[in-house]
Amino acid sequence: MVRRKKTKPYLYFNDMFVRKIKRHLIVNDPQLWLFCATMYYTGLRPGKELRLLRVGDLYFDTKRILVNGEHAKNGIQQYILLPDALAVLMRDYGLHTVDPSYYVWGAKGVPVIHQRAKTLLDYAID
């Protein structure tokens, strides 16, 4: 007979804790806040789908985000909705003025032309 491990109940952040995190990130690391908000609003996976997102994949005029099939878990290139609230955050961050070939997420809180092959985020996810 195989015994199953007892699982712990899922833990979640209460509203007060989320507000504290949000306030802290907006002041101290706005790019990380935008990364978290993008993951929340779109459901994109942080590994490749989100980390390898380019500014040119954001279509503010049609409110869509292009998910490159090479980065998608299912291997299919497709468009997903760019919610209004997220579009406002991205515009406030200035992404609509950045070169479309740049990656959205970069070192030192600014979009970059080249992404490192493997980041700490990748190690955390693996």
Image (cartoon, rainbow, N blue to C red):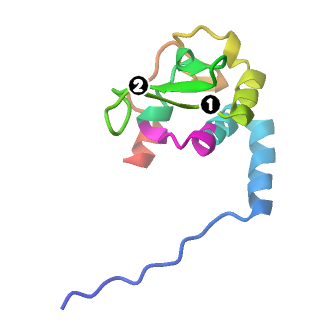
* Stretch in magenta: 38-47
43 is within the stretch colored magenta:
yes
Q: Which residue is mark 2?
A: 68
Q: Residues within 10 Å of mark 2 (few under 14, many from 20)?
A: some
Classified by dominant secondary structure, the portion drawn in magenta counts as: helix
Q: Given this view, does label 1 or label 2 mark the residue nearer the observer? A: 1
Dividing the image into 4 quarters, which one contains the N terminus? bottom left
Q: Earlier in the sequence, mark 1 or mark 2?
A: 2
The reply, left or right, for residue 60 in relation to residue 101 is right
- For this orientation, the residue located farthest to the front is 62
Identified by mark 2, the residue type is Asn
Residue 105 is at least partly visible in this image: no
Identified by mark 1, the residue type is Leu
Q: Nearer the viewer, residue 88 or 98?
A: 88
The reply, left or right, for residue 25 in relation to residue 109 is right
**Would you place residue 12 above or below residue 83 in this image?**
below
Where residue 35 appears, x then y in whole percent? 61, 36
30 is within the stretch colored magenta:
no
The residue at 50%/39% (across/down) is 44
Q: Which mark is residue 123?
A: none
The residue at 76%/47% (across/down) is 22
Where residue 119 appears, x then y in whole percent? 44, 34
The residue at 57%/17% (across/down) is 55
- For this orientation, the residue located farthest to the top is 99
Secondary structure of the residue carrying tag 1 is: loop
**Would you place residue 120 above or below residue 94 in this image?**
below
Q: Which residue is mark 1?
A: 82
Residue 15 sits in quarter:
bottom right
Residue 122 sits in quarter:
top left
Q: Residues within 10 Å of mark 1 (few under 14, many from 20)?
A: many
Where residue 64 appears, x then y in whole percent? 58, 25
